[in-house]
Image (cartoon, rainbow, N blue to C red):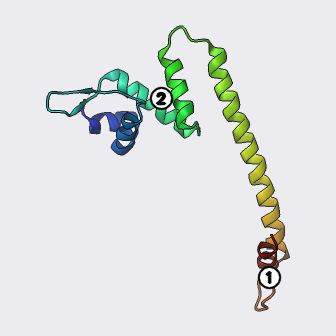
Amino acid sequence: MNISDVAARAGLPPKTIRYYEDIGLIKPQRSANGYRSFCEADVHKLAFLGRARALGFSIEDCRSLMRLYEDRGRESAEVKQIAEEHLSHIDAKIAELSQMRATLASLVEACAGDHRPDCPILADLASK
């Protein structure tokens, strides 16, 4: 398969596939003329990477997950540890975003939004 075929099947842009190859996440075969040649296993790996990235895993997490995915003797505890660490990062980000939202909501509520120049939103931004 060529890169456009595998891109369509894996649901990833060719540019992303080239990037994954550049950083060593996938290693497609090369034909005599230098073109990439993908096999069915590459499609599965790329779909795997696409799903992992859609869940917010970092490139390094994806590298570790791919290594574990390819290792039939793996222990699921290692996979779970990576996922738990990522989940804790997501929870922290949600807490941070919730606090940001609460602060901004109270500032928006405090702003009259009329023709007067005083604005609590600008005052708050200037005070920090």
Q: Residue at x 48, y 32 (%)?
A: 49
Q: Which residue is drawn at 77% across and 83% down?
A: 113
Give the residue type at disc 2. Phe
Q: Pick whichever, 44 or 17, lies toward us.
A: 17
Query: Where does the image place residue 32, in percent across and percent down from the top left?
Result: 14, 27
Query: Where does the image place residue 106, in percent across and percent down from the top left?
Result: 84, 68
Q: Residue at x 76, y 92 (%)?
A: 115
Give the residue type at disc 1. Cys
Q: Name the residue under label 2.
A: 48
- The residue carrying pointer 1 sits among few (fewer than 14), some (14 to 19) or many (20 or more) residues within 10 Å by Cα, namely some
Farthest residue to the top: give it: 73
**Residue 4 shown left or right of residue 71 in the figure:** left
Q: Distance between the residues labelled 1 and 2?
A: 49 Å
Q: In this view, does 104 lie above or below 114?
A: above
Query: Where does the image place residue 79, in percent across and percent down from the top left?
Result: 62, 21
Q: Name the residue under label 1.
A: 119
Q: Residue at x 73, y 35 (%)?
A: 88
Q: In this view, does 97 lie above or below 123?
A: above
- Say how many tags the image has: 2
**Residue 94 shown left or right of residue 16 in the figure:** right
Q: Quadrant of residue 41?
A: top left
